[in-house]
Amino acid sequence: MGKLTEDMKELIKDFMPAYVATADKNGKPNVSPKGSVRILDDDTLIFADILSPNTRANLEQNPQVAIDVVNAKGMKGYQFKGNAELLSSGDIYDMMVEGLKSNPATAKLPPPTYVVKVTIEEALQQPAQ
C-alpha cells in the first residue's frame, strides 16, 4: 500500500496552491507556492519548476522537500516529506509539459526548467489529530 490515501489524493486534487518547502545545504529555508502539484502514483508527487530559482537551487544542494496542502475552510491538510529528483526530460517531464499547455491558466507560461519528482517518505495529517 502506498503512502497516499484516497482522502489525501482528493485534497491534493481540490486545493491548490500547495506550498513547497526546501532548504539549502546550510539549512536556509525557502517556501514557494506551486499550482502544479500532481499525483504520479501512490508514493510520488510531481510539480513543475517554472519560475523558481530558489527552489531549484536548494534542491540541487539538498533534495529534501516538504509539500503542504491545506483546505483552510475545513481546517484540514497534509504535509508530505520526501526526496526530490529534478527531471529535465523523459515521459514524466513530457506529461507535465502537455498538462500545462492544455490548461488555460498555465498555457502561456514558459515550459518548466525541471519537473520535480518527490518520493514520499512521510505523510502527516495537519493539524495533528
Image (spheres, helix red, strand yellow):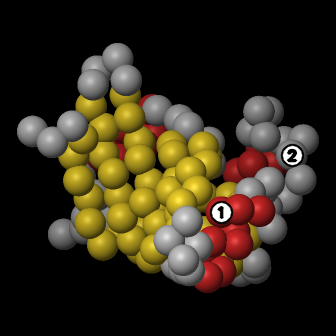
Between 69 and 31, the one lying in front of the other is: 31
Residue under the point 47% across and 66% down: 65
Estimate how packed mark 1 is, as few (under 14), some (14 to 19) or many (20 or more) residues with alpha carbons within 10 Å.
Answer: many
Residue 92 visible somewhere in the drawing: no
Between 38 and 65, the one lying in front of the other is: 65
Quarter of the rendering containing residue 41: bottom left
Residue under the point 35% across and 17% down: 73
Q: Tell me the SS state at disc 1.
A: helix
Classify the position of the C terminus by image quarter.
Answer: top left
Quarter of the rendering containing residue 47: bottom right
The x and y percentages for residue 42 are: 33, 64
| Label 1–label 2 contact, CB within 8 A | no
Q: CA distance from mark 1 to mark 2?
A: 18 Å
**Residue 113 numbered mark, or none:** none
Nearest to N terminus: mark 1 or mark 2 = 1
Q: Tell me the SS state at disc 2.
A: loop
Q: Nearer the viewer, mark 1 or mark 2?
A: 1
Q: Is residue 47 left or right of residue 43?
A: right
Residue under the point 80% across and 68% down: 113
Classify the position of the N terminus by image quarter.
Answer: bottom left
Residue 101 visible somewhere in the drawing: yes
The x and y percentages for residue 94 are: 74, 68
Vertical arrangement, residue 97 with respect to residue 44, above or below: above
**Residue 55 numbered mark, or none:** 1
Between 125 and 107, the one lying in front of the other is: 125
Residue type at the position of mark 1: Thr
Q: Is residue 109 left or right of residue 97?
A: right
| Residue corresponding to mark 2 | 109
